[in-house]
Image (tube, rainbow, N blue to C red):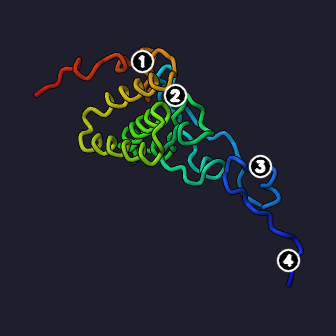
Amino acid sequence: MDDPQPKKELPKILHDWDPSLNSQLNLPFEKRDPRLEVLIDFGGLRVWEVEGKDVREGYEIDFTEGGNAAKYEFIPVDEIWLDDWLTDANQANELWPTLLHELTEYKLMGAGGMPYADAHKEASIVEMNARLNPIDIHKLVYKAAHEAMDALGIHGDMSESKNLKGESTTSAKEKPSDTKTSA
């Protein structure tokens, strides 16, 4: 028996998606801005908490944990996106390593022109080392943000950085060797 209505074919890549097809395909979602709130403002580079489900349904099905403009063309160049599940109280230890991974990957791909697979591998090594020695994770993130901004030509004043609680921070100006550690 012939189907009276031919089925529409989905586009091969999501950025070619025509939102008007949603109603024709009876899809339950639409493309919308997934950004929820700024988690960290590095004074030129913002880290956004995003509704991960909205990103996966409206932009990229493979979006997992986080992303940057070098990997995903729908993310603005001055933003890093982190999936909202990372801000859940039970996942608090996941946010900083994931952010470090995204910043490292962004620097390598965006400024160095490294292919995604290679940049992802390098960023995963940096992330794993930080997970094994989490004491300096905040310094590593601020250093990576500074390096990414410099490498990508994103201009801003990191002395105006805000942390997750909206408090000013001067971590961006410190060098790891400037901080005393107790033995």
Look at the numbered discs 4 and 1 and tell me whether their residues touch, using CB distance below 8 Å.
Answer: no
The residue tagged 2 is 46
Mark 4 crowd level (few <14, some 14–19, many ≥20, 10 Å Cα): few
Q: Position of residue 139 (x, y in %)?
A: 31, 27
Q: Residue at x 66, y 53 (%)?
A: 13
Three-letter residue code for mark 3: Pro
Question: In terms of secondary structure, where does tag 2 sit?
Answer: strand
Three-letter residue code for mark 1: Ser
Mark 2 crowd level (few <14, some 14–19, many ≥20, 10 Å Cα): many
Three-letter residue code for mark 4: Asp
Mark 3 crowd level (few <14, some 14–19, many ≥20, 10 Å Cα): few
- The disc, 4 or 3, on the residue closer to the chain's N-terminal end is 4
The residue tagged 1 is 168
- The disc, 3 or 2, on the residue closer to the chain's N-terminal end is 3
How far is mark 4 from mark 3, CA to CA? Answer: 24 Å
Question: In terms of secondary structure, where does tag 3 sit?
Answer: loop
How far is mark 4 from mark 1, CA to CA? Answer: 62 Å
Name the image quarter holding the N terminus.
Answer: bottom right
The residue tagged 4 is 3
Closer-to-camera residue (131/18): 18
The residue tagged 3 is 19
How far is mark 3 from mark 2, CA to CA? Answer: 27 Å
Q: Residue at x 77, y 49 (%)?
A: 19
Q: Position of residue 48 (x, y in %)?
A: 53, 34
Look at the numbered discs 4 and 2 and tell me whether their residues touch, using CB distance below 8 Å.
Answer: no
Three-letter residue code for mark 2: Arg
- The disc, 1 or 2, on the residue closer to the chain's N-terminal end is 2
- The disc, 3 or 1, on the residue closer to the chain's N-terminal end is 3
- The disc, 4 or 2, on the residue closer to the chain's N-terminal end is 4
